[in-house]
Amino acid sequence: MLKATKLPPELISLVHHIELNKAGWWDKSIQRLILSVLWNSNNCLTTNKIIEELNSQFFINISLNQLESQISELEETNSILRHNGYIKIAEECLSKLENERNEIHNIEEATIRRFKEIILQHCPTIDIDELWSNFNNYLLMPLIREMGARTYEIISGNSPDIANITSFREFLNIYPKEHHKALRASVINFLDPKNNIVRKYILSHLNAYFLLEASNLSEETLKKLLSNSSSNPRFYVFADTNFLFSVLGLHENPFNEAANFLMSLTKSLTNKVNVNFFSLPTTIEETKKAISFNCDNLSKIIMAENLVAATIDTEAQLSYFARRYAEELKINANIRAYDFFYPYINNLTDLLKKNNIRLWNYDKNYFNNISTNQEIVDDILAQQEFEKKYFPDKAKSYENIQHDVILWHFVYGKREKIINSPLEAKFWVVTLDNRLLGFDRYKNKNQNQTLPLCVHPITLIQILQFWVTKTPEFEETVLNSFRWLFMSQEFDAEAEKITIRILEVLSRFENCNDLSVDVVKKILVDDALRGKIKCEKNLEKDVEFVKEALIEENKKIENKLNEVLTVIEEKDNLIEQIKEDKNDIETRLKEEQQMREHLENRLKNLEKTINHNNTIQNQKSARFRFVLNDIILSAIFMFLLSIIISFSSSKLTSFSFWDIQKMLSCIILALVIYRANSQGLNNDDINNWAIFLYISKFRTFIYTVLVGVIALFLKEEIATFIKHIYTKQ
């Protein structure tokens, strides 16, 4: 057997495309394993060395003749080259293998990324890299090997045990209990059959493990298997009660999907394999009894709207019958339990026939006699003791055990005594009941039988893959079988009875409608109440217990309400305090705002005053400079110049020094006024000065006066000049 370790990507890439429904799958598997040995060696190998490596690496025993036959086929396809007794992979084939390995590597990388994304959602505190390593080593790879080996065990005649999956417990035990729920959710989420990458990753490993296991099939088994797979074998499958419930949609079980897929799968294989489903009359009767029992229990309950809602959504143990009935009541509030279950009780055979499950033609005397058969009675009693020992609180009734034992013996009696292949068995029992599967293993062990009689739907699906073309739907179902193993929970009938009794008592209360859905849901899962009712069989006591539970729940609600009111009051007080603080702060802010505005106004006024003073000061400075530079200094300069001119002119003319000086003073005064006016008009600090404006206003008059004064001084010279002109004429 191959160990449950991770397979090398080279091997995965070589064998994961092989399809069991195609002819020559076994030969192709061996050829791919030979290529894997040559690839891993990186050298040329002899045939003896290849045989040795096949055994060393994959625990496969193959004869020299078988090896030579497969090598010849590889040579014909130009996959290998042989020279001087040594064999190696052809370059073209090697290049193709490298590409396939890279594809597998990319799928693995994408799968790891998907795993890490899920872990970050559910278990962010756990080391992701270490978790991936543990997940592969302690759960995924062991589980894949178990599932791959299970198909091998079926076709080789060994009895697989679908219920004995220990790898999940081993994986969970690595981590503290508080992480177990999140880890379970992570694993179920990761094993999503709709995710193409994860599906490819797991199914490629699953296929590889199976083909490795199948490589060791005996020559006799292999011949029969290949012979039967090319013909149209027959399967006569007898359905157990729980399988019928799954098909009818009356069973809440994670494996419902497997049961329904098995039914649809067999329809698509009618041209390749004949699978016929039957039910025994005893199974029909047991199914009717179970439905009638639930109908009677539910008919005692007047399901108000709140009870309906709680029944649909409760976490309490409750059969799917009750949930289905509650869902129907949600649509049609007037329907009675009897009306709802009538078709299943009175027309069960017809309903099953529509689902391709027929009633087996039987002899009534046979079933009357078989029930008193000593071997059957002994098996019933032995199984009854087993149930009491290992399931004291959940032991099956005598009638249930009797049904299982009769079903087993009836189908066992239909089989040939010597069977070498599952395809020769023909007669099977399909069941979702782990205890019936366990009884089958017990009987097989005592009778030295290796092939199981009772099988799980998944097992039949695995057998039928020899005739199935791989479709996404088929691959999704195979991958879903991994998830179902983690989701499967055994139904507790006793726990359901307690739930029904609580619902019955609640429905009797006058004001039942006033109870909220949440209160009803809490009452249904109240452990203390359920413990009391479990130990009591009196209805009046049940009513008393439920009343106590309601009172207790009411107290809890009141306490919670008081706590909430206290919290609300504290929050109201806090809000009031915050409001007061807010008002104080707003008042202070308003005062500060007013003070700020006042200071800002004062600051503005001060700035205006300063600016005004600066303006005045600048004006004074400008006017001072104007008077000094443009008037006084200009006048002084011109006056001094006039003295020089007057002195010089007095020597040359008849005018006296003072006369000339007087005239020049008038001219200087006019020039000073003109210059001051020109400069002042271009200066904003001067042109609005009152003195400047006054002088500017009378400057024309001043000019006139000055001209008159000068003319007065020159009157004699002017008169002489005029006289002289007239004399010449």
Image: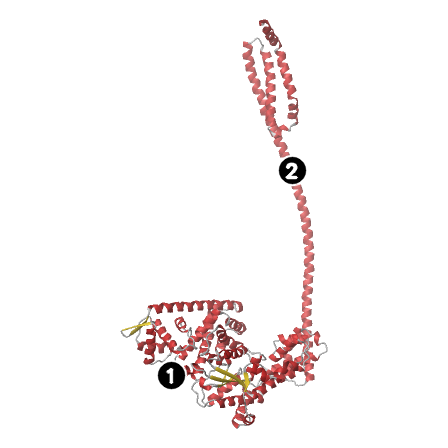
Comparing 617 with 60, the one in front is: 60
Residue 681 appearing in the image? yes
Q: Is residue 555 above or below residue 277?
A: above
Mark 2 is on which residue type?
Lys
2 vs 1, front mark:
1
For label 2, the residue is: 608
The image position of residue 163, as x and y in percent, is 50, 81
Residue 219, disc: 1
Q: Tell me the crowding category of disc 1: few under 14, some 14 to 19, or many 20 or more residues within 10 angstroms, Cα based.
A: few
Q: Is residue 587 above or below residue 476?
A: above
The image position of residue 422, as x and y in percent, is 45, 84
User: Total of numbered circles in the picture?
Assistant: 2
Q: CA distance from mark 2 to mark 1?
A: 115 Å
Residue 270, disc: none
Comparing 396 with 427, the one in front is: 427
Q: SS for tag 2?
A: helix
Residue at 54%, 12% (x, y): give it: 648
Q: Quadrant of residue 644?
A: top right
**For this view, does 105 lie left or right of residue 547?**
left
